[in-house]
Image (tube, coloured by chain):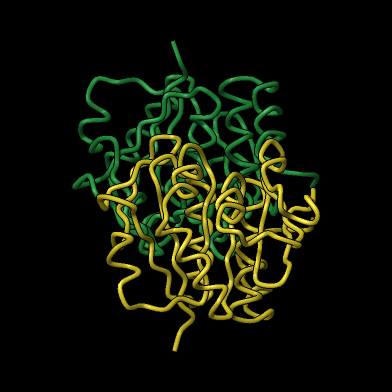
Chain colours: A green, B yellow
Amino acid sequence: MPVRVLVPLADGFEEIEAVTIIDVLRRGGVDVTTASLGERSVRGAHGIIVSADATLDEAIAGDAYDAVVLPGGMPGAATLRDDSRVLAALRQVVDAGGTAAAICAAPIALEAAGLLTGRRATAYPSFRDQLVSASERSDARVVEDGPIVTSAGPGTALEFATALVARLVDGDTAAALRDGMLLGAR
Amino acid sequence: MPVRVLVPLADGFEEIEAVTIIDVLRRGGVDVTTASLGERSVRGAHGIIVSADATLDEAIAGDAYDAVVLPGGMPGAATLRDDSRVLAALRQVVDAGGTAAAICAAPIALEAAGLLTGRRATAYPSFRDQLVSASERSDARVVEDGPIVTSAGPGTALEFATALVARLVDGDTAAALRDGMLLGAR
């Protein structure tokens, strides 16, 4: 069984972050389902229109995921935070032993889901103050604490996505992807 | 007048590269037109479906561009290389004093357009041998030589896109974008 990941997309999603997550996880052999909150066509924060694989209602009907991963971008991240279905999917995946992950502005949805209590997390710098229940608001590029993975912004998206491959698939696959995509030394 | 950039998209385009180019140039204030070779809906190499702003025939009818920028990915880059309209657009923008740029596999289209003669260029490592007319096949992450800008792969896309902003807009705008997107030290 391949690893299954749900990536919800709301209008105003950050395109580099969303596409990097989807592309890299698929390179790693993960079965990624992108899901729109409403109609299948979703418009990013910089005007790029992506056709989601399914609506969120379709995507969460009966299927179990190993991880739910949220791209940032505004107003997309706020819309994710305000959608009760997204918050339920985040809580459900963690309750089932899976991973909830978010980058840039989107950790505000993890906060709203009540998943950051007592955990270290990061976000885009101007959004870190909103992670009020986190035990530490980190300035690291990627933070993993228990079931929660967070990252900071577009420039950290490849590190975030390959960290998710290392966690959900294995480290060798992630290392091969980093080499193959020419991430270079950091 | 804003700077105008054409980004042709063929089925099998590399999504991280295409979206990074479009997103970063738009963040820099550039007027980007994405153009599909056939129908407006284009499918990337990792299954992400993007709706282009226009067809290539629409996009090249009467409009002048300051740059034409090609994402990599296969078979997208080979399709770009084999499309006479794409090669004509590349030659025309260079003849008019503009920039022709390509990343990953797509420098093979610059080669086919006859634009690499006597110039340094790079590409994804396994495609560099195809740049037969270049004076030097570089292993740098981004190479600028005269009107030609080339880069290596998904992991260099942010550096490529911000180098294009520095060239087409200005260096301060590019530096602000690098900071704002959290590219970090390299």
Q: Going by the image, does B43 lie left or right of B137?
A: left
Along the viewing direction, whichever of B36 and B182 lies nearer the viewer: B36
Q: Number of callouts in the render? A: 0
Q: Quadrant of residue A163?
A: top right
- Residue at the top extreme, as displayed: A1
Where is residue A142 shown, x and y percent of the image?
65, 44
Along the viewing direction, whichever of A173 and B14 lies nearer the viewer: B14
Q: Going by the image, does A102 lie left or right of A162?
A: left
> Visible in this render: residue B120?
yes
Image position of B96 with respect to A89: above or below: below
- Name the residue at 19% across, 47% down: A39
- Residue at the bottom extreme, as displayed: B1
Where is residue B115 shown, x and y percent of the image?
62, 62
- Name the residue at 42% across, 24% down: A31
Where is residue A181 shown, x and y percent of the image?
65, 39
Image position of B65 with respect to A5: above or below: below
Q: Going by the image, does B2 lie left or right of A168?
A: left
Q: Going by the image, does B123 lie left or right of B169?
A: right
- Name the residue at 62% across, 57% down: B158
Where is residue A107 shown, x and y percent of the image?
49, 49
Q: Quadrant of residue B52?
A: bottom left
- Name the residue at 78% across, 50% down: B137
Image position of B78 with respect to B172: above or below: above
The image quadrant where one finds the N terminus of chain A is: top left
Image position of B3 with respect to A179: above or below: below
> Visible in this render: residue A111?
no
